[in-house]
Amino acid sequence: MNEFFPDIQQAIPFEGPESKNPLAFKYYNPQQMVGQQTMQEHLRFSVAYWHTFKASGMDPFGAPTFERPWIKAETPMEQAEYTVGAAFEFARKLGAPFYCFHDRDLAPEGATFAESCQNLEKMVAKAKQLQDETGIKLLWGTANLFGHPRYAHGAATNPDAHVFAYAASQVKHAIAATKELGGVNYVFWGGREGYETLLNTDMKREQEQMARFFHMAVDYAKQIGFEGQFLIEPKPKEPTKHQYDFDAATVLSFLRAYDLFDHFKLNIEANHATLAGHTFEHDLTVASINGKLGSIDANIGDPLLGWDTDQFPTDPAICTLAMLVVLKQEGIAPGGLNFDAKPRRGSFDEIDLFYAHISGMDTFARGLLAAHQIIEDGVLDNFIEERYSSYAEGFGKSIIDGQESFDSIEQFILQQGDPAYKSGRQEMLESILHSYV
Amino acid sequence: MNEFFPDIQQAIPFEGPESKNPLAFKYYNPQQMVGQQTMQEHLRFSVAYWHTFKASGMDPFGAPTFERPWIKAETPMEQAEYTVGAAFEFARKLGAPFYCFHDRDLAPEGATFAESCQNLEKMVAKAKQLQDETGIKLLWGTANLFGHPRYAHGAATNPDAHVFAYAASQVKHAIAATKELGGVNYVFWGGREGYETLLNTDMKREQEQMARFFHMAVDYAKQIGFEGQFLIEPKPKEPTKHQYDFDAATVLSFLRAYDLFDHFKLNIEANHATLAGHTFEHDLTVASINGKLGSIDANIGDPLLGWDTDQFPTDPAICTLAMLVVLKQEGIAPGGLNFDAKPRRGSFDEIDLFYAHISGMDTFARGLLAAHQIIEDGVLDNFIEERYSSYAEGFGKSIIDGQESFDSIEQFILQQGDPAYKSGRQEMLESILHSYV
Amino acid sequence: MNEFFPDIQQAIPFEGPESKNPLAFKYYNPQQMVGQQTMQEHLRFSVAYWHTFKASGMDPFGAPTFERPWIKAETPMEQAEYTVGAAFEFARKLGAPFYCFHDRDLAPEGATFAESCQNLEKMVAKAKQLQDETGIKLLWGTANLFGHPRYAHGAATNPDAHVFAYAASQVKHAIAATKELGGVNYVFWGGREGYETLLNTDMKREQEQMARFFHMAVDYAKQIGFEGQFLIEPKPKEPTKHQYDFDAATVLSFLRAYDLFDHFKLNIEANHATLAGHTFEHDLTVASINGKLGSIDANIGDPLLGWDTDQFPTDPAICTLAMLVVLKQEGIAPGGLNFDAKPRRGSFDEIDLFYAHISGMDTFARGLLAAHQIIEDGVLDNFIEERYSSYAEGFGKSIIDGQESFDSIEQFILQQGDPAYKSGRQEMLESILHSYV
Amino acid sequence: MNEFFPDIQQAIPFEGPESKNPLAFKYYNPQQMVGQQTMQEHLRFSVAYWHTFKASGMDPFGAPTFERPWIKAETPMEQAEYTVGAAFEFARKLGAPFYCFHDRDLAPEGATFAESCQNLEKMVAKAKQLQDETGIKLLWGTANLFGHPRYAHGAATNPDAHVFAYAASQVKHAIAATKELGGVNYVFWGGREGYETLLNTDMKREQEQMARFFHMAVDYAKQIGFEGQFLIEPKPKEPTKHQYDFDAATVLSFLRAYDLFDHFKLNIEANHATLAGHTFEHDLTVASINGKLGSIDANIGDPLLGWDTDQFPTDPAICTLAMLVVLKQEGIAPGGLNFDAKPRRGSFDEIDLFYAHISGMDTFARGLLAAHQIIEDGVLDNFIEERYSSYAEGFGKSIIDGQESFDSIEQFILQQGDPAYKSGRQEMLESILHSYV
């Protein structure tokens, strides 16, 4: 097989924080124990097939800029074979234990649906072989239901039942492929499940269609014995003006309304959270406290740009806050941290893929180390416990336990008068946080 | 009683679209029939006590600018009496059938909780008398749980149970006052129910506290026989960095999670929707298709400013889209359209309050007329019905009815191949919409 | 020649405001006099070659959706010939008097620079012939210096002088082509003239490069006798993180700093203004009061989306405010109103291009009519004149004339005391504006 | 004199990075040399009188929350005296070498203009005495021309010449006070110099008024021999819908247009830059490369909130980027780093002021250390120099030197063909940056 990254002959080494080598890890040391687990077990890094191997550098104003050697092939299937080779070579050299894919990343769309399915089957067999050879595993699979023009008005939420049927057929095979490859999760991102204008849209009907679609997917997984976790990935907008899976809370509402709550968790993406007006840690927390944080797309956006920039994380403070949520819910497995991120359009070279992933992995490793130490030292947890202590006993506990009414509470106030004011100590806590990062 | 608007001696007249008189209605003609109801019955306009009579023109960078004659009084209670007089005089001259208030707008906070309650009782008696004299009614009451420093870290979600208790006591009296005044709705806006930083916050616990609070309010309403509608008003942020009632979908998720769904509807505010990243019509639709659109705060924001500007509506297209949602759910009653809006800080004069409200009422009246005609002509509805017609029978219907599986659907696709592409006709529909406005 | 719009056999007719025909004008009546000019003379509508004929419906998440008949050709040059035919057929049937193009829209990039130049020359000859046949004219030409990967790091501001040279060579031919076609303007939009990160950027040097480039363009125009107007089009960001031509004020500062002020005017685009945090009318006004409003890109954005949506205008109030600026500076000629706008991705059909342009033209025609009447009636101008009248004589005039100092002014205040407060009457003025729309 | 911060008995100590004491510096070690200067000389920290001593915790939805001991006084002047005592006590204990004030922070507005001036004179004398006693100096003074209702429609740009005159009189005394106190800068922030609506605004006239005002200030400074630096502080909006001093580029354009360029530099505020759509380092760079970076307001905003949150800086990466700009222009003196920042509303206690300032000072000290080392190591500078090296000699140099034309350049391209593509290495550079922070 071809070698696509000849400049990297050895797996990226760990050299420690003093290293200035951009092709070495400074913080990510896979086998280092952090609490009861290794870094690798905590972080479960995954390479995103679409951005890392299929992104072209195209943007709305410009043509492709990445001249990857693996796309120089005679036929689409030959290109697909080169690409999967490049993918496993990259993950192996980088030291990433997982990857994620869309059906149409792995194998090209054929002239007919049947041919598309055959293409996928062939490439799944190839990927399986490479998984076996390298030990790299599939974190999750998914179906691309947003790229083809047939999905311009939605997939499950399309006004045309024919398109709904096409999408269902495609998802059937994507779930089967994920099962075949031992994937431990399957993700739904509804990139066109939303609307461009309410003038032509029946929102209620479209949500019912979407619920029907998900129920059928649940049934199908049961039918074939796929036991991976089903995940929905919220995003507020882009490509549509407004997506139905706006943010974690919106998806939870939908799952509750349509009797799907037990069957799905969430895949939270940092850049999607910020586009919805939330911090990354906010949407992680909303998912987590509802028992629904299943996996993470570990990128960042640009807070001054209004679109999905899908950049590699560089800020260890953000990653610390994220890892605090993860550690408190006892880990992200069977989910993981998937780098749904791409180098900038002008980072033309294959070596830039290494720089970018190494930087992202190091940033999360710093976050893991800081979060672990913060929890060990109890600096935030103790503060919070003390802050809410009035509910732990006495009248506060009686309120929470449902033993008080507005009448009895008013008696308390008439006797006790006004509460004292207690500072929230935000500045002190921010200072403490940054002293750990 | 004093007269506070001596420049307006007669009720604002309807003069029709050709009038250029800024002190006359051009579209709002209260008794004009639109379909089966009068404009007044459709629109149920309400004046917001806080903005219209209590706003001072203060902003984060500047001192009060409005020197209202009704605040020139010796004592807070005397000021409150002047203010309620001004309020009913204004609503009467304007021709607004409803008003809305917070407890602390109507009556000043006293030195003790007991004194605050007495103040409120006195002012409720006064308001009741004025209601009887003028025929103006209470659309909704609410409690201000965000202005006083005790609520800086939240009311129901405060880390201190003492503050929770204070808030509960205050709401008890606000609900009672609303009942006493015949209010047909009671609103909860949790201006501080959120957080400034997650570093000091236990989000799960705070949401449980909030749920407990709402259950107690439901119990109390039952206890005293208050039969008005309970409404929650979503807002994403401001004053807090992040409010728990972010938008309609978030509140619906909360209500579903905590067994409160049957007891609450939503009060959707236009400017809150846009701050959350939604159009006004989006959040109205989300509420409506879930059977939860209870009432409306009828203002607009400035799309280029990131805070709640609470401006009077001026764009008839936005109001047309809003009224389409209202008409399709067969009206907003017992809710209404409350002008939660204020003149700009430099609109110093009392007469500016008239200009502003007249403009807002006319804008919604234009929206009502356009929406009614659009529905009568069926121009949008017919298009939508046709657009989704593939689900009305045949294979599409079978899908929706739950009679198909991924397997049977795949057979359909293998036989039928790719769907045809159908334009969504957004530009044509926008052109049609604007031809009605 | 082929016919590409067979469904439209006649030029789009004017049918008046009562018409519900989406393929007729309701307001745009080209020969109708508005003041001293016809609507056509005032509005100078132009069709944008790139969006209307070259846009594919591709977006960052999806493949092309528009299957235009004119792109079904054997070779790029044959496709270019079909396309120019479609363009003139469309403009003729629509009744648009102008068009605009980029060099690479009109003719495809060749294998070498020389071949690209030859392609352009051939297509210019073809376009010239069609101009003569139809009477349709060129509003402006420009060069595409952002689409090709060579420009990923900028054109004039590229760190590589070789790229600067390529861009200069390309602009040379684009100006020559514009001259050959009788274009009355030439536009510079620096889509990649900015940066992705300051970490690799020398901003000062890049601005000097850009200035050098513009001076060379000025020299070249003089050399070949091109007498059209040079225009710079501001945009804050997208595709780059940050463009140097952020907004009107930023470009004016640049022109002043580098001795280019006399040689350029601005082409203001509505959606670019809003992305920069300004209303459309703001950036029009900034340009106009500096004597630099040269032409207009007449689209709108979606205020809730953070990217350039390039939608057709639908809001007559916005167009009224825009036309107020235009009428007050005595017209936009030799510039015009170019529809830098595209149908949504799901508006698949050629007929959607007609719906979209008709709607846009009608919206601006409504704006023209309203603006003209507002000026005729003097309702805003009289208010403003009165508002600033204190500077027209007496002490105010003496201040403005430079005859007072801080010392003399303080004497005035010590004698006169505090000023009276005067309402800005914003709500009344908004009401008046909307009564004209 | 009273002691207002009895909990802090000693100056805040430096304890080094390992310290977890929130009342100690971990990085800011005033006398530590960084290059040729001490940290204190580099950073020139200043306490902002208004936020730190006058902020009340009031926000648009809530009452004051800070019960400062120094505001408990009988009369406004007594309160002013307590406050100035608190200010110098705080700065001394914190170890801040500078402070900044508005006229109306230091001394209360009186019943007449003359009384206001007398109040100011008295307080200036008091402050001067405290400066002498403590060695703390005035970084800059300014006049508050935005808080009083008379300025609701602007100060210099007010439509009423009487208000212009009032503002001029006020500035006269504020400059004189700054001179008297040895202030080395004087700042103009035009909080109301902008508009709420263009419907009532003559933008051109208002800009001319503003220019006149500045010229008079320049004349006055010359007249009294004030030799401090004049600074304009850009801000895009808030409190007005749109301020004329939108950002650095806009102010530079204004200064160039009205012959004021030689007399002013800029005071760049981080949160103002981000509200304008720029990073902090962007607006610093724009000012610096134009020779106009005079001083800095060292706060941060919340990227998800659309208003001026004025928070203390906590992100060392942002401060590193800022200090890179400062070090490259050889320092910020005679300007400094003023903490125009406030604790959150719920940080009720005086001790929170210490936590906040210590955190902010440490964050900038980290930034200084990192920036210094990056420059020492040349890691970014060398990359940039190499990146632009094609302009340093040969054809590139000839272009920049103005010795080439479009014709000669085209000859080069016809011979040389297409340029090679060179990666911008953004991800590698980001990784390097974060390895220094």
Image (tube, coloured by chain):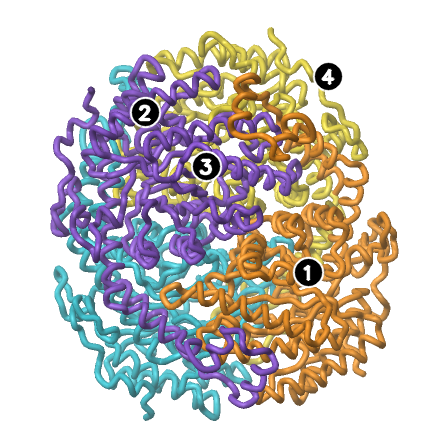
Chain colours: A cyan, B yellow, C orange, D purple
Query: What residue sits 30% from the left and 80% below the top?
Result: A90
* Residue D100 shown left or right of residue D86 in the figure: right
Rounded to the nearest whole Å, what is the CA distance between mark 3 and mark 2? Answer: 71 Å
Q: Marks 3 and 1, how far apart in space? A: 77 Å
Residue C411 position, x and y percent, is: 54, 21
Which chain is indicated by disc 3? D
Q: Which residue is mark 1?
A: B386
Q: Is residue C168 visible?
A: yes
Query: Disc 1 to disc 2, how far (Cα)?
Result: 53 Å
- In the image, taking residue C50 as reference, residue B167 lies left or right, namely left
Q: Is residue A147 visible?
A: no
Which amino acid type corresponds to the residue marked 3 in the rendered image?
Answer: Lys
Residue holding disc 4? B10
Q: Secondary structure at mark 3?
A: helix
Alpha carbon distance from label 4 to label 3: 59 Å
Is the residue under label 2 in contact with that under label 3 (CB below 8 Å)?
Answer: no
Marks 3 & 1 on one chain:
no
In depth, the one of D255 and B263 nearer the eye is D255
Q: Indicate whether D282 appears above or below D350.
A: below
Identify residue type, mark 2. Ser
Disc 1 marks which amino acid? Glu
Asked where in the image residue D97 lies, by quadrant, the reply is top left
- Left or right: where A184 falls relative to C383: left
Query: In 3D space, how far apart are the residues under numbered discs 1 and 4 (Cα atoms)?
Result: 50 Å
Q: At x 39% / y 76%, what residue is drawn?
A: D389
- Which tag is nearer the camera, tag 3 or tag 1? 3
Q: Are marks 1 and 2 in contact (CB under 8 Å)?
A: no
Query: Disc 4 vs disc 3: which is toward the camera?
Result: 3
Q: Chain of mark 4?
A: B
Which residue is under mark 2? Answer: A405
